[in-house]
Image (cartoon, rainbow, N blue to C red):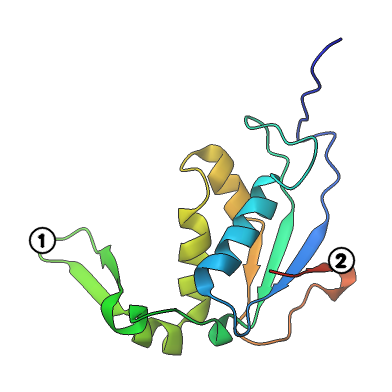
Amino acid sequence: MSTYFANANTIERKWYVIDAANKPLGRTAVAAANILRGKHRPEFTPHADCGEFVIIINADKAILTGRKLEQKYYYHHSGYIGGMKSVQYKTLMATKPELAMTLAVKGMLPHNTLGAKAATRLKVYAGANHKHEAQKPVAVEV
């Protein structure tokens, strides 16, 4: 008996939609990362790209528990001396909720070429509308 290994050519990718309204940002990101990686499939293979597409809607209505809105910061650096920038999550969620959700999901993916490829299959929208109705996405409950 031989072990079955899935590969990217044999996988048929489906589309899933996750509604983040009134759900914790991290819990939604975990569900999305597992689907993007393909860990929900019985033929999951760690070294193969067998994940699927994920659409996250209502990212602006996701909640952060505790005092994270005041205490948590997003840092990035411009590359120049003294170029460290910081943004409080209260501001980030008010101005760019898609970025906050994308950063959370990307942090839960592997930091290699598989994770980079999986991140391209993530679509995040602040509102309830998305432009992927033609793909007939299946709703996932978090």
- Measure the alpha-carbon separation of dots 1 and 2: 46 Å
Position of residue 104 relative to residue 5, above or below, is below
Horizontal side of 60 relative to 132 (left or right) equals left
Q: Residues within 10 Å of mark 2 (few under 14, many from 20)?
A: few
Q: Name which residue lies at 78% across and 30% down.
A: 6
Q: Name which residue lies at 55% across and 85% down.
A: 60
Q: Nearer the viewer, residue 69 or 75?
A: 69
Q: Name which residue lies at 64% across and 60% down.
A: 31
Q: Residue furthest front?
A: 66
Kind of residue at disc 1:
Ile
Kind of residue at disc 2:
Gln
- Residue 54 spot, x, y in % from top left: 70, 62
Residue named by callout 2: 135
Quadrant assignment for the C terminus: bottom right
- Residue 53 spot, x, y in % from top left: 73, 57
Position of residue 80 relative to residue 64, above or below, is above
Residue named by callout 1: 81
Check residue 105 in the rendering and tell me which mark sits there, or answer none: none
Q: Residues within 10 Å of mark 1 (few under 14, many from 20)?
A: few
Horizontal side of 101 relative to 118 (left or right) equals left
Q: Quadrant of residue 76?
A: bottom left
Q: Nearer the viewer, residue 104 or 76?
A: 104
Horizontal side of 39 relative to 103 (left or right) equals right
Q: Dots 1 and 2: beta carbons under 8 Å? A: no
